[in-house]
Amino acid sequence: MNTIQGIQMIGTQRSGSNLLRVMLDGIREIAAPHPPHILQRFLPLLPKYGDLTDQSNFYRLAQDVCELVTVNPVPWEGITIRADEVVAACRQQTLYELFRVIYESAARQTGASFWLCKSMKNMLYAEGIESTGISPYYIYLYRDGRDVALSFKKAIVGEKHIYALAENWKKDQEAALRLKDRTAADHFFMLNYETLIASPEKMMRQLCNFLHLPYSDRVMDYYKSRESENTAVAGKMWANVTKPILKDNTKKFLRELSSEDIAIFESVAGDLLQQLGYSLYTPLDLLKGSFSDEEIVFFNEENIRLKNVFIQQADPADLAKRRPQDELINRIKQY
């Protein structure tokens, strides 16, 4: 049996990760299904399953994880994930092993030698992933955090107040850079979103070379693919994957964020912005070294209010596509 190699994309969502995923899915050797976020969703739920060395507990976990994949808003076309087959292929009775077997099964069923997981928070679980014997290639995709924040403000997922968005973006970049420090250079690739959209073919050729895979012209035709079509119809926030590269999709925050929001973001995460090569736009005397407890309480309350308002105004079709996974997670919480 041929060895299957893993690719783990890391960083923060709204950084062009679905664009990069569907581009890489154009490489015949890579299976890159849309992520159901197995680890991020199930690690907090593990206490509900008890001792996983008990076969019945582990099988119940496997059934629920497989259901999460099956009801993903973007279907895993041509891939069948069955709990009995997954459990039979497991060498350990852990959630990380279920993750490994499911992604390797996706690769085998599509004739690929690589799988790619776009659950970017998996950088927080790298040690657990690697405990299964996976030695993944990590692709750290990063984007100007202020544009990431602006994108999240318009998305059905994520935080909505600039303070929370800045805090999360900063923590994510710090975690990605810590993982870089402990990963062999030939298994870690840093990719800047702004450079990707400015020189897409050049960067994708470099990435294919890093993965020791042949480049394909299908990479640049990603927007015509079935996977891009399925992704776009599953949610408005992914609509751009059916369009050619949007080369001017940078520094939108200068037009659409207030100077106050930019100042808050740069006060929280300015050091990481500069470390990654981005300039600050707030005068130094307007940057704050810290915020008061009262300010933070207000920011957090406003974040909750904005999230509630957003959900109330969200497209019912978008909410409906996410409902099966939400109902599954809520059902598990009642165990």
Image: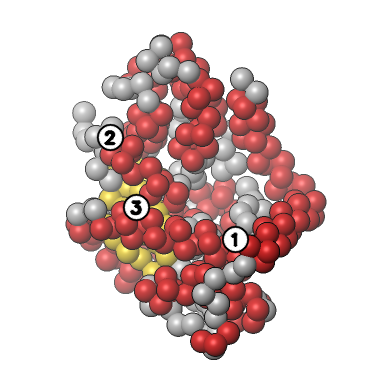
Say above or below: 282 vs 101. Answer: below
| Mark 2, secondary structure of its residue | loop
The Cα atoms of the two marked residues, 3 and 1, are separated by 36 Å
The Cα atoms of the two marked residues, 1 and 2, are separated by 32 Å
| Mark 1, secondary structure of its residue | helix
Q: Which circle marks residue 164 in the picture?
A: 1
Q: Residue 1: x and y, percent?
A: 21, 28
Crowd around label 3: few <14 · some 14–19 · many ≥20 (10 Å): many
Along the line of sight, the residue nearer the viewer: 35 or 60: 60
Provide the residue designation for mark 2.
Answer: 131
Based on the displayed image, in which of its 4 quarters is residue 154 positioned? bottom right
Tell me which amino acid carries mark 3.
Answer: Ile
Q: Residue 13: x and y, percent?
A: 51, 57
Tell me which amino acid carries mark 1.
Answer: Ala
Q: Are marks 3 and 2 in contact (CB under 8 Å)?
A: no
Based on the displayed image, in which of its 4 quarters is residue 292 positioned? bottom right
Picture residue at 42% right of the left edge, 70% below the top: 272
Along the line of sight, the residue nearer the viewer: 179 or 317: 179
Q: Which circle marks residue 27 in the picture?
A: 3
Picture residue at 19% right of the left edge, 54% below the top: 184
Q: Which circle marks residue 103 in the picture?
A: none
Q: Is residue 214 visible?
A: no
Q: Are marks 3 and 1 in contact (CB under 8 Å)?
A: no
Say above or below: 283 vs 166. Answer: below
Based on the displayed image, in which of its 4 quarters is residue 217 positioned? bottom left
